[in-house]
Image (cartoon, grey):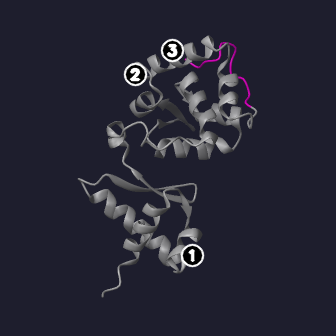
Amino acid sequence: MDQPELSTILEAILFGAGRSMTVGEIAFAAQEDEGLVEGALSNLRATLSRRRSGALQVSEVSGRWIMEVKPSLSDRMPGGVRPDIPQRLMPAAALIAYHQPMSQSTLVGMLGQRAYDHVRELSAMGLISRRRDGLTRRLMTTRRFAEYFGAPDVESTKVRAWFRKQASDAGMTGAELAASLSGGQATIMEYGPSGGEE
């Protein structure tokens, strides 16, 4: 029987893991050299992106690789099947929704350096857009974000208004809401006198 290609083995490992993995973890599972695995992961990502009718993609965020459903298909998945947003990303997601359009530098001022990784992960999940704006990036929620959180409208200014109302109804500022979503594990700096950036 022919030995399967390394990229095929890695596809099976990532699919079976159901979580993100470092190159080291994947190499250990495949019993292969990390350099070979890194090249094969890039090949696998390219192969999957060329499959027009495929449902899956391979993404790399902050040095971790994951196999996931393409963002364009997320709205067709039942709620119980959709992957949850990791709790550590919730404060960044809440702050972006509350203050959008928000500069990435402002988010970093509120959350610290971890904000850069969180923005990359939220963007890879299709929940936010990040567009170059001078020396920083302008962050806004996407249609997928609105659908995931059950906002009544997908347009970013309407999502912002809806998110602010949720916070107001709970008697919280944007920073307090974001801190509550972190499970008490994050200190978040308040932003602006009115809590928003127009």
Q: Nearer the viewer, residue 34 or 198?
A: 34
**Residue picked out by circle 1:** 28
Percent position of residue 165, x then y: 56, 13
Nearest to viewer (mark 1 / mark 2): 1
Q: Residue at x 70, y 14 (%)?
A: 193
Percent position of residue 154, x then y: 39, 23
**Number of the label disc, if any, that sits on residue 155:** 2
The mark that comes first in sequence, 1 or 3, is 1
Q: Nearer the viewer, residue 6 or 195?
A: 6
Is 119 placed above or below 160 here?
Answer: below
Cα distance in 3D space between marks 1 and 2: 44 Å
Please give the range of residues in magenta: 188-198
Q: Residue at x 54, y 46 (%)?
A: 120
Is 69 placed above or below 134 here?
Answer: below
Q: Which amino acid, by three-letter code, is at mark 1?
A: Phe
The mark that comes first in sequence, 2 or 3, is 2
Disc 2 residue crowd, few under 14, some 14–19, many 20+, Cα 10 Å: some
SS class of the residue under badge 1? helix
Q: Which amino acid, by three-letter code, is at mark 3?
A: Ala
Cα distance in 3D space between marks 2 and 3: 10 Å
SS class of the residue under badge 2? loop
Cα distance in 3D space between marks 1 and 3: 47 Å
Q: Residue at x 59, y 20 (%)?
A: 197
The mark that comes first in sequence, 1 or 2, is 1
Picture quadrant where residue 86 is located: top right
Q: Residue furthest left?
A: 53
